[in-house]
Structure formats: C-alpha cells, structure tokens
Amino acid sequence: MIEQTTGIVFDPVFLKHDQPSHPENAKRLESILTGLKESGLYQKVEPIKSRRAEIKEISFCHTKEYINYVNEFCEKGGGHLDPDTYANEYSFDAASMAVGSSIDLTKSVINGDLKNGFALLRPPGHHALANRSMGFCLFGNISIAAKAALQNPKIGKVAIVDFDVHHGNGTQALIGDNPNILFISTHQYPFYPGTGSIGEIGSGQAEGTIINIPLEAGVGDHSFKIVYEEIMLPALRRFNPDILLISAGFDAHWDDPLANLNLTLTGFNRISRALIKLADEICSGKIIFFLEGGYNLDVLRNGVINTTKGLIGIESFDDTLGQLNILEPNINKLINELHQIHKL
Ligand SMILES: [Zn+2]
C-alpha cells in the first residue's frame, strides 16, 4: 500500500499580498515557512500544485459583482477595500490562488491521493461576506472548499470547526442555511466582529447546524478542554461528517497582540490532535486545516509546526512560550446552556 502524505497549499503570490505595517502581513507566512523548513517538516509534506480559482468557483459563495470589483480594484493598484482590509495589485491573484488551491487540496484528500492537509494561505477568509471584504479577508476560502467538497458524490456532509479567536461570521453567512454543513466556532465574546452569540443556531432545515461557543476574555486551556469534551467532540460525532475542515487561527493564544483568550501552544496542540483523532474515528482521517489569523509570529510558527506534526503522525510538540498563571473564568453556565440549546 502506498503511504499517504500530508498535502500543503502554498504559493509565493501569497507573500505579495502585503502591507508591512498591518498585523496581517507577509511575515506571518514567511515565519511559518521558515519554521517548517528549519524543523525538517517541509521535506515530509507534499506541496500541491497551486492554481487560480475560476470565477464560477469563487461564485459558490460570492457575488459576481463583488469578485469583479475586487479584481478591478487590484488591477488599479489597490488600497483599502474597507477600514480593516487592504489590497494591492497582487491581492486578487493571491486570493484566487488561495481558493483554487484549497479546492484542489480538498479534492485530493477526498479522493484519497493525500491523507490530510494544511492550506498555508493568505489572505485569510473567515470574515469575508458574499458581497464585501471584512476583517483582513477577501474570499471565504473554507466555505468555498466546503461547497466544492459537497459537489463530490463521496461527500454528503461537511463539518467546519473554527478555533480562531474571532467569530467566523463570514463562514456562518456564506454556508447559509445548508443542513449538510455543520459550523462550530469557539471565539472570544463579546468581541470583533460582534456576531457569534449562543442563540445563532441556523434556521429552517439547518436549525442546529450552527453552534456558537462564545467565550469570555481569560478563557484558556482548561476551559477549552471542557468545551471539546462536552460540546465540540459530541456534536461532531452526532453530525458524522464525511470530511472535517478547520479554520485554524492562532490568535486565541495568551500572547497574541489582538485578543484576550489564554490558550497556550500546548492547548492548541491538544485541540489539533483531538480533531485529527476524531477525523480518524469518524471520517477516515479526512481533515484539512486552513490558515486564518494569529499575529504573534512565534505562536503562529510553532502552532503550525505542532499541527503539521499531528497531521503527519509525529507525537512530539513544542511549547516554547509557556503559560500565564491566571485563574480562568468558570464556564459551567455556558456549558449547561449549550447542552440545553443543542441537546447534547
Ligand atoms: Zn482572528
């Protein structure tokens, strides 16, 4: 039997979408790549051939008017698409390369050509809406990949887990009320972008396929362990998806400059491994991580290295930054409410 490998998405154009003074800049991905190469992991994964998405693929989630607008905006040299989100002459190219390559990675994992994968892409995607950019995001990479996956007859259901510190409002909006996509997000709340309350659960036939787990500032490893054991893993087992897609942001770390949750690299490692293990249990190991946020370069680099080791099957991991010794808020009330709302 041929040993399956872990696929990665990367293209040099992702580094050309850049504004050095902005927290979401090219150094983030450069730091990750350097880390993977120096640790010898880059030699153990298989970079897939990248390609630009066709307009019709981006239109799985975005309006043609918006796609054309971004294209023309970038052709004219770029600027700010909204107060938070910049674009330059390369950004449309980078964003469509991110989408096209993510679709192909997903396809390869579904077909069994690759074991699992990590889409090391920029710009990120989980805040992008159908007709506008938002929160550093141009196109909803993971939502488009989820919809593309559902076109494959082998895939009846897709689950998306979002552990970025910010609510994946874009993903929640773009997947719409599709009962075949489960979306579960853990995020700091109340916080940017303002959505993601516990009561947002989807509607119509899709009621219950959105699970928002809003966490107050200060929540860290201990509470995440409870969230995963009590809510995340049981909900994923019940939904029983054919593939697991993960919005992997590393900004819920205690040392991230933009947010206030308290995960450690050890906590992130536990989360990634739990999801990889669950994928083995319920969907033949089919799991793909998609890079979202994370603005401390050490956290980002080590977080991705540890996750990649998990995907390859290497047990060791490094927590170079340690923990903050603070008392976490008690989340029992939240867990009880989630149990009630989602009948878990
Ligand atoms: Zn984020």
Image (tube, rainbow, N blue to C red):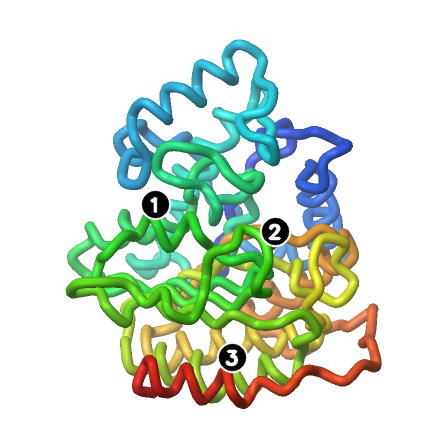
Residue 275 picture location, percent across and down = 48, 74
Tag 2 or tag 1, which sits nearer the N-term?
A: 1
Q: Which quadrant would the C terminus be assigned to in this image?
A: bottom left
Q: Nearer the viewer, residue 205 or 162?
A: 205
User: Alpha carbon of mark 1 to alpha carbon of mark 2: how far?
Assistant: 18 Å
Q: Which residue lies at the image location 78% right of the left edge and 62% below the top edge? A: 255
Mark 1 near mark 3, Cβ–Cβ under 8 Å? no
Instruction: Report the residue marked by disc 1.
Output: 144
Type of amino acid under label 3:
Ala
Residue 344 lies left or right of residue 74; in this view the side is left
Residue 53 lies left or right of residue 117; in this view the side is left
Assign a secondary structure to mark 3: helix
Q: Which residue lies at the image location 66% right of the left edge and 67% below the top edge? A: 306
Type of amino acid under label 1:
Ile
Instruction: Report the residue marked by disc 2.
Output: 293
Residue 49 picture location, percent across and down = 46, 39
User: Alpha carbon of mark 2 to alpha carbon of mark 3: how far?
Assistant: 20 Å
Query: Tag 3: Cα neighbours inside 10 Å, few (<14), some, or many (≥20)?
Result: some
* Residue 199, placed above or below residue 85: below
Tag 3 or tag 2, which sits nearer the N-term?
A: 3
Type of amino acid under label 2:
Gly
Q: Which of the 4 image quadrants contains residue 332?
A: bottom right
* Residue 281, placed above or below residue 50: below
Assign a secondary structure to mark 2: loop
Assign a secondary structure to mark 1: helix
* Residue 213, placed above or below residue 196: below
Instruction: Report the residue marked by disc 3.
Output: 274
Q: Is mark 2 within 8 Å of ligand 1?
A: yes
Query: Tag 2: Cα neighbours inside 10 Å, few (<14), some, or many (≥20)?
Result: many
